[in-house]
Image (cartoon, coloured by chain):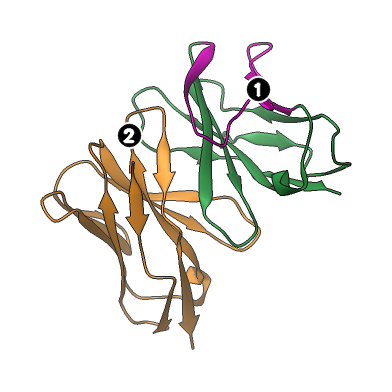
Chain colours: A green, B orange
Amino acid sequence: EPEVTQTPSHQVTQMGQEVILRCVPISNHLYFYWYRQILGQKVEFLVSFYNNEISEKSEIFDDQFSVERPDGSNFTLKIRSTKLEDSAMYFCASNPPGGTEAFFGQGTRLTVV
Amino acid sequence: GQSLEQPSEVTAVEGAIVQINCTYQTSGFYGLSWYQQHDGGAPTFLSYNALDGLEETGRFSSFLSRSDSYGYLLLQELQMKDSASYFCALNTGGFKTIFGAGTRLFVKA
């Protein structure tokens, strides 16, 4: 069964460093998302991406964040200068055309020290 | 803005039926979704209501009333593996889903 794949599963980084989280969405999906979940809290929307551009972003998604789809398969989230409060689980998700179900990857646990 | 409220915890007995409620505030949306998340896992889609009424998928059913800004997830024949967090979420078109804070369901033997 097709699935959304995220790498790495766990990333530890020092405060102020840049990190890139990688995702391979399901191949025929058109809508891509990044969400984050701080431990024990709700899933928070960060950004959606469609037709090679950002469709919507939340107030969390400030200038420190960027997304890219550098080729036909990968979808990345970059955090330029990480802060302690960026520590969270980051989920990538995708939707098929016309679909209402978001398929989530297993997440990348980011720990900023 | 948009917001959703759901109970923080619910406890039920194996084999029983449990209902998890969700109330929301929004200026407009396409539908209400429900997701299940086990500890350490990713959210997985359970159900979606675009229209008022009941949607049934196996042991899970979901209900929406737009006039009451209210929905619920009904889980029947509870099993221990149903112990997880359940999130209601507003679909604001194809590009954004806003999640509630989640309801932690404990199923006891």
Q: Nearer the viewer, residue B37 or A42?
A: A42
Q: Position of residue A46 (x, y in %)?
A: 54, 35
Kind of element beneath mark 1: strand
Q: Amino acid at mark 1?
A: Ser
In the rendered image, residue B99 lying in the magenta stretch gets the answer no
Badge 1: how crowded within 10 Å, few (<14), some, or many (20+)?
some
Q: Dot 2 falls on which chain?
A: B
Q: Amino acid at mark 2?
A: Thr
Against A11, residue A62 (above or below) is: above
Badge 2: how crowded within 10 Å, few (<14), some, or many (20+)?
some
Residue at image point 50% right, 72% down: B83
Q: Position of residue A72 (x, y in %)?
A: 63, 12
* Residue extent of the magenta highlight: A52-79
Whether residue A24 is visible, yes or no, is yes
Q: Is residue A48 left or right of residue A23?
A: left
Question: Which residue in the protein does label 2 denote?
Answer: B92
Q: Nearer the viewer, residue A28 or B64?
A: B64
Number of numbered discs: 2
The image quarter in which residue A107 lies: top right
Looking at the rendered structure, whether the residues under marks 2 and 1 are on a common chain is answered as no
Q: Which mark is residue B5?
A: none
Mark 2 or 1, closer to the camera? 1
- Quarter holding the N terminus of chain B is top left
Question: Which residue in the protein does label 1 denote?
Answer: A66
Q: Position of residue B68 (x, y in %)?
A: 14, 56
Q: Dot 1 falls on which chain?
A: A
Residue at image point 57% right, 33% down: A2
Measure the C-alpha gap from mark 2 to mark 1.
Answer: 22 Å
Whether residue A29 is visible, yes or no, is no
